[in-house]
Amino acid sequence: MGHSFGAGIGAALATGAPTYVVAGDGAFYMHGMEIHTAAELGLPITFLIVNNNAHAMCHTREQVFFSGDYTYNLFRPARIGAGVAALFPGVRALHAADAAALDRALAEPPDGRPVLISIDTDPHQVPPFRPFHTHS
């Protein structure tokens, strides 16, 4: 979890090409401050943070194996885009609450600096992980 932040920075440094990093909110909480490096170096990286305000795989296990009777893995909403915008003025930080907002955010022309797009998702959606779909 979180490997993509350092890998994306390395790829952008090695190639100078626009780079995309896709990570969940949990991975962001572990390694997201690597965005500071991207901002300091002005790297052309777009960070797509899929934010479900949960430890989604843990929550899914609770739903599948424990009938969803309880959860310890859902959290209050976090405004990751707003937080990154406040921390790193050199990063264009956006928030996508739905597919149309994500389309608009991705359509904005690159300006050579890092971009972070926080994408809201539903924590109750079951990931495409075979054991979760075949468990009876």
Image (cartoon, helix red, strand yellow):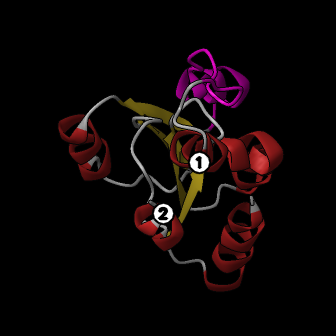
| Secondary structure of residue under mark 2 | loop
Q: Could you tell me if the residues under marks 1 and 2 are in contact, i.e. CB atoms within 8 Å?
A: yes
Instruction: Indicate the quadrant containing the N terminus: top left, top right, bottom left or bottom right.
Output: bottom right
Using residue 18 as the reference point, say whether residue 54 is left or right of it: right
| Secondary structure of residue under mark 1 | helix
Q: Horizontal and vertical percent for residue 136?
A: 44, 60
Question: Which residue is farthest top?
Answer: 76
Please tell me whether residue 79 belongs to the stretch shown in magenta.
yes
Residue type highlighted by circle 1: Phe
Q: Which residue is under mark 2?
A: 135
| Among the 4 quarters of the image, the one containing residue 12 | bottom right
The residue sitting at 76% across, 67% down in the picture is 3
Residue type highlighted by circle 2: His
Question: Which residue is farthest bottom?
Answer: 15
CA–CA distance in space, label 1 to label 2 = 8 Å
- Is 21 rendered above or below residue 73? below
Q: Nearer the viewer, residue 75 or 11?
A: 75
Which of the two discs, 1 and 2, labels the residue nearer the N terminus?
Answer: 1
- Is 41 rendered above or below residue 130? above
Q: Horizontal and vertical percent for residue 91?
A: 59, 39
The residue sitting at 66% across, 69% down in the picture is 8
The residue sitting at 26% across, 34% down in the picture is 98
Using residue 53 as the reference point, say whether residue 3 is left or right of it: right
Using residue 41 as the reference point, say whether residue 15 is left or right of it: left
Q: Which residue is under mark 1?
A: 65
Q: Horizontal and vertical percent for residue 71?
A: 64, 26
Which segment is the magenta one? 70-90
The residue sitting at 42% across, 50% down in the picture is 126
Q: Identify the main secondary structure in magenta.
A: loop
